[in-house]
Amino acid sequence: MFDPAGPVPDLSGPTLRVARRLLGAYLVRREGDVLVAGRIVETEAYREDDPASHSYRGRTERTEPMFGPAGLAYVYFIYGMHHCMNVVTEAAGTGAAVLLRALEPVHGLETMQVWSGRQRGVANGPAKLCQALRIDRAFSGVDLRHDARLYLRAGPPVPDAQVRVTPRIGITKAIEQPWRFVVADHPEASRP
DNA sequence: GGAACGATCTGC
DNA sequence: CAGATCGTTCCC
């Protein structure tokens, strides 16, 4: 089980390695007395030299957090109705991040069910996990290492034998890059 | 000012 | 596989 006062995960190093390393870490959401947490089981890496990345064409108001220090949140609004959340990586000045695509609920499942309006599969998708944790653009730019309402905590590392690497999902550029990381055979992953 | 598009999800 | 639905970006 996650420790709400435990250490922050190691977010240093290249984006691909951070995306891999974030598997098994906990994303925690606190709203007043309510605490909700999920274990990260699916991620995707987005680098600055990557045509599929929002940072590829330089800084904009929306993507500004991507160019901040590792550990910031980058949350964007997509398709007129969904939010997706990233963990920013690399040194300040470099635009890169890791998209969180699925969580395994580990605390506050009932709250996630209410917040997401679902009974099952509350966080098995990038937009669904934002619903389950009530994350929206207001959180873009917060420091996930120190924020009181949304933060990361280290978890037991996931062994290599349990990690599957595949191309990223839902993009139209750089579709061949195997930059998606999934905990193998995990029921909460958005896809095998 | 306007148009095209999108790191999704659901339901047919 | 089409449709929802609107912020962001880019071009005029």
Image (tube, coloured by chain):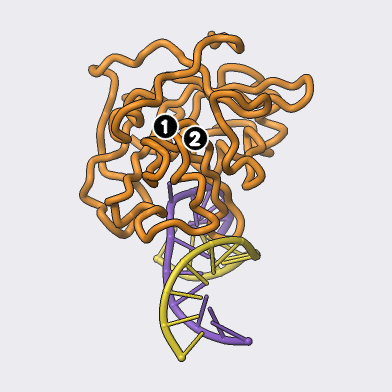
Chain colours: A orange, B purple, C yellow
Residue in view at x 29 percent, y 58 percent: A173
Query: Where on the picture, by quarter, is residue A147?
Result: top right
Query: Where on the picture, by quarter, is residue A142?
Result: top right
Residue in view at x 45 percent, y 13 percent: A155
Closer to the camera in the image, A6 or A161: A6
Residue in view at x 33 percent, y 54 percent: A52
Q: Are marks 1 and 2 on the same chain?
A: yes
Q: Give the letter of the chain under mark 1.
A: A
Query: Where on the picture, by quarter, is residue C5?
Result: bottom right
Identify whether A144 is placed above or below A80: above
Q: Give the letter of the chain under mark 2.
A: A
Q: Are marks 1 and 2 in contact (CB under 8 Å)?
A: yes
Residue in view at x 40 percent, y 25 percent: A11
Left/right placement of residue A140 relative to residue A18 reads right
Q: Position of residue A6 (x, y in %)?
A: 54, 9
Please name the residue that numbered disc 1 is placed on.
A189
Q: Position of residue A64 (x, y in %)?
A: 50, 50
Q: Residue furthest right?
A: A32
| Residue type of the residue flagged with mark 1 | Ala
**Cα–Cα gap, marks 1 and 2:** 6 Å
Closer to the camera in the image, A23 or A152: A152
Please name the residue that numbered disc 2 is placed on.
A124
Q: Residue furthest left?
A: A176
Other residues around mark 1 within 10 Å, as few (<14) / some (14–19) / many (≥20):
many
Q: Secondary structure at mark 1?
A: loop
Q: Position of residue A13 (x, y in %)?
A: 31, 28
